[in-house]
Image (cartoon, grey):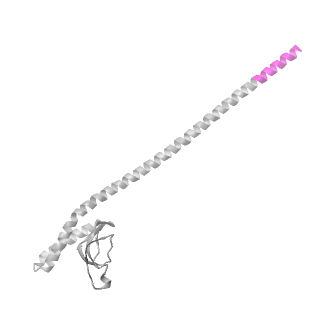
């Protein structure tokens, strides 16, 4: 009986040891699973941070390239705005020369200079705002005076252009100063 009892105690001790070992193994597995879950969460967070950083960098690159284009465009706009008084002077000179009895060479020379300058500026995106006879439009015209007209079809129309207006690449850089019929 003692032998049986000793065998039972040994079996019980082995079972207890086995249960303890299984419990320890189960705890280790739970710790490993928890660690794996934490690492997976960290990897997911790092991946999300990486994607956000890449998107932010892409937006930064796009924004800076757009700013560079705007800077170049603005520089050319300022240069062309500075040349507009020269264009006005050429137009005035052509008008005076056509009305005078001066030589044809002076007329042709002035016209050639005006055409070359205007042609070059047109290649850069400059366009004249057509105003004479058009309906008054506050988006492109600036009324400097109103003139009473008899005909109904001339009311609200541009009667005279005081200063030519220009657009650069579709944006108004100088409004056409006009006299409107009322």
Q: Residue furthest top?
A: 2
Q: From this viewpoint, which residue is outermost toward the bottom?
A: 151
Q: Position of residue 163 (x, y in %)?
A: 23, 71
Q: Quadrant of the N terminus?
A: top right
Please give the range of residues in magenta.
1-16
Is residue 4 a member of the stretch shown in magenta?
yes
Q: Is residue 125 visible?
A: no
How many marks are shown on the rendered structure?
0
Magenta-colored stretch includes residue 14: yes
On screen, 143 above or below 150? above
Q: Quadrant of residue 13?
A: top right
Is residue 28 among what the camera can see?
yes
Q: Quadrant of residue 29?
A: top right
Q: Check the picture and name the quadrant holding the C terminus.
A: bottom left
Residue 86, placed above or below residue 48: below
- Find residue 60 and report its horizontal and vertical position in percent: 41, 50
Name the foreground residue: 152 vs 49: 152
Magenta span dominant secondary structure? helix
What residue is shown at x 35% (from left), y 54% (from top)? Answer: 67
In the displayed structure, would residue 91 be above or below residue 3?
Answer: below
Q: Is residue 59 left or right of residue 161?
A: right
Locate residue 27, reporting x and y percent. Answer: 68, 29
């Amino acid at each position: 009986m003692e032998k049986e009892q000793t065998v039972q105690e040994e079996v019980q001790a082995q079972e207890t040891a086995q249960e303890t070992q299984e419990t320890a193994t189960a705890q280790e597995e739970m710790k490993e699973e928890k660690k794996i879950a934490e690492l997976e969460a960290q990897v997911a967070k790092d991946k999300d941070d990486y994607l956000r950083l890449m998107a932010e960098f892409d937006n930064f690159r796009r924004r800076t390239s757009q700013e560079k284009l705007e800077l170049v465009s603005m520089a050319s706009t300022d240069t062309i705005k500075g040349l507009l008084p020269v264009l006005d002077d050429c137009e005035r000179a052509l008008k005076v020369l056509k009305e005078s009895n001066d030589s044809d060479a002076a007329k042709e020379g002035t016209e050639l200079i005006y055409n070359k300058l205007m042609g070059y500026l047109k290649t850069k995106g400059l366009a004249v705002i057509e105003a004479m006879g058009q309906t008054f439009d506050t988006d492109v015209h600036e009324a400097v005076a109103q003139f009473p007209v008899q005909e109904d079809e001339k009311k609200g129309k541009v009667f005279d252009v005081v200063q030519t207006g220009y657009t650069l690449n579709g944006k108004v850089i100088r409004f056409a100063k006009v006299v409107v019929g009322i």
